Amino acid sequence: MIRSNVALTAMLILLVAPTSSGIDVDPSDHGPSVGLKAIRVYGGNMEIVQRPLRGPVIHRDPVDTVCQVDAVEEIQCYAQTPDSEAAGDPEGRDLTEGDIVRAVREIGLPSLAVRIQPGDETLVNIPTIFYTLPQEFARNINLLGFNIDLTADPVSYRWVHGDGTTSTTSRPGAPYPALDVTHRYRVPAKAVRPRVDVTYRVHYRVDGGGWQTVGQTLEASGPAAALDVDEAAPVLTKP
């Protein structure tokens, strides 16, 4: 794996070098553009690429070469100057919401198990109770040199009943005697596969700053449960 390949990282540091001995100032935004060769590694394949390093105007050559592994296990190498604001960001750009979304997807949001009452068997035409137990999501990660705090809150629950129907609620349901989330199966069936898919709203803050909310929601599908739907037979009894 890339993270454990110390020898490869050392080799990358030796391979990376500036393509010019100075800094060219871009008059359009008064920022420098330093041409660098970077090493990108994906699944054992190594590629040398050219990319600019952007930062404040400085008047001396870059010194030191820094390599790091980012959130998608890509080794990035770049030159660092003593007063460069781009240190910690190999692409010389701000952290984007897309970076946050990719990191959260890599970590994985909680997949919740559906709970069913009366159990792994139910009857047609009676309310079968569904509920789940929400889990807290809170993480602290380092992403592109930034310290990121992450949280996520469930905003909706999509109940997949296993008979071709679904329903969506804003609540996780509750066990009997509550009847918050129920479903009536109309025909008997063996091994229907109900589950619950949870939609999350993700919040983050960068380097201890104010909390922000990711514009898009993310969904986590829960594992399917096994449920048999039986038909009750009427029985005549003598009073």
Image (cartoon, helix red, strand yellow):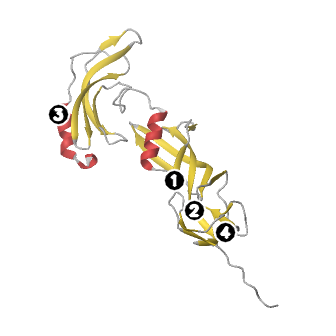
Q: Which amino acid does label 1 sit on?
A: Ser
Say if 168 sits above or below 234 in the image: above
Q: Which amino acid does label 2 sit on?
A: Val
Q: Earlier in the sequence, mark 1 or mark 4?
A: 4
Side (left or right) of 52 relative to 224: left
Disc 4 to disc 3, C-alpha distance:
70 Å
Secondary structure of the residue carrying numbered label 2: loop
Residue marked by disc 4? 124
Where is residue 146 drawn, in percent x and y? 42, 37
Of the 4 image quadrants, the one containing the C terminus is bottom right
Disc 2 to disc 1, C-alpha distance:
10 Å
Q: Do the residues labelled 4 and 2 touch (CB within 8 Å)?
A: no
Residue marked by disc 3? 14
Callout 3 crowding tier (Cα within 10 Å): few <14, some 14–19, many ≥20 = few
Q: What residue type is labelled 3?
A: Leu
Instruction: State which mark lies toward you, 1 or 4.
Output: 4
Disc 2 to disc 3, C-alpha distance:
53 Å
Where is residue 189 drawn, in percent x and y? 57, 67
The residue depicted at 61 percent of the width and 68 percent of the height is 188
Where is residue 115 drawn, in percent x and y? 59, 65
Q: Earlier in the sequence, mark 2 or mark 3?
A: 3
Disc 1 to disc 4, C-alpha distance:
26 Å
Q: Which of marks 4 and 3 is nearer the N terminus?
A: 3
Q: Which of marks 1 and 3 is nearer the N terminus?
A: 3
